Amino acid sequence: VVAGKHPDCHGFAEEAEIHTFRVFTQRQMSFTSWFLDAFNYAIQTRMNILNLSIGGPDYRDQPFIDKVWEMSANNIIVVSAIGNDGPLWGTLNNPADQPDVIGVGGIDYKFNLAAFSSRGMTTWELPAGYGRVKPDIVAYGKDVPGASIPGACRSLSGTSVASPVV
């Protein structure tokens, strides 16, 4: 979607420098330590922006949360997919629900919030303050052309597609 160079599926920023971190197995399993290693690399190499096309309901993973905050403290802009659990209110995913993370929702080509896009109020400031409405920003996330591994072009949908567009 971003740096694709396929003749039929040009990326938005073909010359972008992309660092890809494999943090999931082929069976979609992961461990917090794999994310922490990737986040530490981002901090040590002074990356400017970190996109996370992932998310989940586990807001109690304190080492993960602390490291996201550490990235923000080190001037890394953290952008994350908000989740595909819409259209219900209150379906935000971590880390996009955090106040210092830019949570990205998806829209269709008619500029409507995509039905799958999560939405709702954050709870990080409660009870001492008010929750914020998320997503913070939206980008095309439905039927976005992107390159596939075999080298063809395919249609992609989800907030994980919208997040790198930001």
Image (spheres, rainbow, N blue to C red):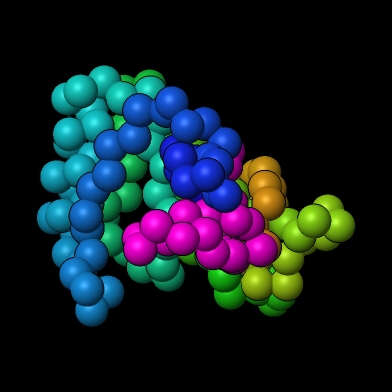
User: Is 43 left, or right, of 56 in this rendering?
Assistant: left
Q: Nearer the viewer, residue 80 or 109?
A: 109
The image shows residue 112 at horizontal and vertical percentages of 83, 59
| Quarter that holds the C terminus | top right
The image shows residue 35 at horizontal and vertical percentages of 22, 52
Q: Is residue 13 among what the camera can see? A: yes
Magenta region:
143-166
Which residue is situated farthest in the right direction here? 110
Q: Is residue 98 among what the camera can see? A: no
Residue at the location (57% across, 36% down)? 12
Q: On the image, which quarter does residue 87 sit in?
A: bottom right
Q: Nearer the viewer, residue 28 or 129?
A: 28
Q: Nearer the viewer, residue 149 or 115?
A: 149
User: Is 28 left, or right, of 77 in this rendering?
Assistant: left
Residue at the location (13% across, 55% down)? 33
Q: On the image, which quarter does residue 74 sit in?
A: top left
* In the depicted structure, whether residue 78 falls above or below residue 60: above
The image shows residue 127 at horizontal and vertical percentages of 56, 54
Residue at the location (14% across, 45% down)? 37
User: Is 6 left, or right, of 166 in this rendering?
Assistant: left
* In the depicted structure, whether residue 27 falls above or below residue 20: below
The image shows residue 111 at horizontal and vertical percentages of 83, 53
Q: Is residue 162 magenta?
A: yes
